[in-house]
Amino acid sequence: MRRSLRIRFKENPILSVTHHTLFEYPSPINLSYAWNFGSMALIILIFQIITGILLAMYYVPHALLAFTSIEFIMREINFGYLLRFLHANGATMFFIVVYAHTLRNLYYGSYLYPRQLLWSLGLIIKVLMIVTAFLGYVLPWGQMSFWAATVITNLVSVIPYVGDIILWWLWGSFNVDHATLKKFFSLHFLLPFIILFISLLHIIALHQNGSNNPLGIDIPLKATIKFSPYFLIKDYIGLIFFLILYLSLVLYMPDYAGHPDNYLVANPMVTPAHIVPEWYFLPYYAILRSIENKLFGVVALLLSIGILFVIPFINRPTLRSSNFRPFYSKCIWFFLVIVLYLGYLGGCAAESPFIEISRLMTFLYFFMFLILMPFVVALENFSYDLVKFKK
C-alpha cells in the first residue's frame, strides 16, 4: 500500500515535481550547510502566507480603524499577539535568510553561466519582497508607518511627466489616507502569492542546470547523489537552528526590530524627529539620503539593486568559486562590510558626519561592482591563463 501511494505520488503531474525536488533531485555530493538558505526561504514564505491570511481575517484597512484593529488582534483574539509577532518577525527572518542566500551566491559564483536566469529570478523575488515588506510596514498605521509611506511614495513624483499621476494613483487621493491603505493592503495580500509563483519558476530554473557547489565546477550526473535523505537531513538540522532563533526572537524580543513610534497612532500633523524604516531597508535608505538631489537619489537607489542583475554579464571569471580566488573573496567580504555600514548609517540622523560617510560608502558600493570587481576578475583570469600556459 505504501509503495502504491508513492508510485501515484510520482505519476501525478503536479506532485511529481514536489517528489523530485524533495527526494530524487540529483545534488552535488559536496554541498555544505550554506545551501540550506534556499529551502529555508521557501518554508518561511509559506509560513508568512499562512499567518498573513489569518491576520487578514481581523485587520480593517481603514485609516480610522487600522491601528485599533491591530490592538484588537493583540488584546482580544486568542493568541492574536503571538500570531502578529510571528508574522512581523517572520519578515525579519525572511530577509536574513534571503540576504544570506544572496551573499552565498555571490561568494561561490552561482550567478554565472549557465545560471543567469536562476539568479535573475532570485533578484526579482528579492525586489518583490522589498515592496511587499514596505506595504506590510504601512498597514499598522502607526506614526512611523504613516510617515514612511508619505516619504517613500513621494519618491515616484521625480519621474518626468507621469510622476504625479502615479503618485495620485498610489494615494487614491491627494494625500496618504483611507484609499492608500486599502490599496496597500490589497497589494500586500496579493504579492506573496506572486512571489510563491516566481519561487516555483526559480526551482524549475534550478533543476534545469543543477545546483552549484563549493568547488564551482560542473559535476557530472554520475557524481551526484539524491537529495533525500542526505541533504534533506541537513535541511532539517538547519531548520531546527532557524526555529530556535526565530522563536527566541518572537517569545523574548518580539519588538526588537520595531520602532517605538510605530506604537503611536498615525498623526499627519506631527512629523517624527527622525524617520527610520525597518532594518532591512536601511542600506538602501542610506544610499537614498546620501544624495541631495531627489531624482539622483532615487536613481542611485534603483541602481543599487539593478546593478545586481548585470553582474553575470560584466564579470566572466574562469573559476567560479571564491575558494580559488583570494582577491575576489576579499571583494565579497568588503561588500558585506559596506552593506552593514550603510545599514548603520541609514539608522542615524540625517546630519553631519553621517551624510558625508554615507556618500563615501555609496561611492564604494558602486565602485566595487563597476570597477574593483571587474578588475579583480580580469586580473585573476590573466593569472590563471598564465599559470596554465606555463604548464
Image (tube, rainbow, N blue to C red):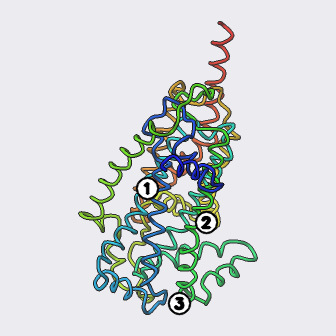
Under tag 1, what secondary structure?
helix
Q: CA distance from mark 1 to mark 2?
A: 28 Å
The answer to whether one can see residue 357 in this image is no
Tell which tag, 3 or 2, sits nearer the viewer: 2
Q: Is residue 180 left or right of residue 139?
A: right
**Residue at position x 45%, y 69% in the image:** 50
| Residue 169 spot, x, y in % from top left | 66, 83
**Residue at position x 53%, y 63% in the image:** 130
Of residue 83 and residue 225, the one placed in the foreground of this image is: 225
Q: Relative to 284, is 50 above or below?
A: below
Q: Relative to 255, is 284 above or below?
A: above
At label 1, the amino acid type is Gly
- For mark 2, does the 10 Å Cα neighbourhood hold few (<14), some (14 to 19), or many (20 or more) residues? few
**Label ID, residue 178:** 3
Q: Relative to 26, is 379 above or below?
A: above
**Label ID, residue 343:** 1
Under tag 2, what secondary structure?
helix
For marks 1 and 2, the one nearer the N-term is: 2
At label 3, the amino acid type is His
Name the residue tied to disc 2: 194
**Label ID, residue 190:** none
- For mark 3, does the 10 Å Cα neighbourhood hold few (<14), some (14 to 19), or many (20 or more) residues? some
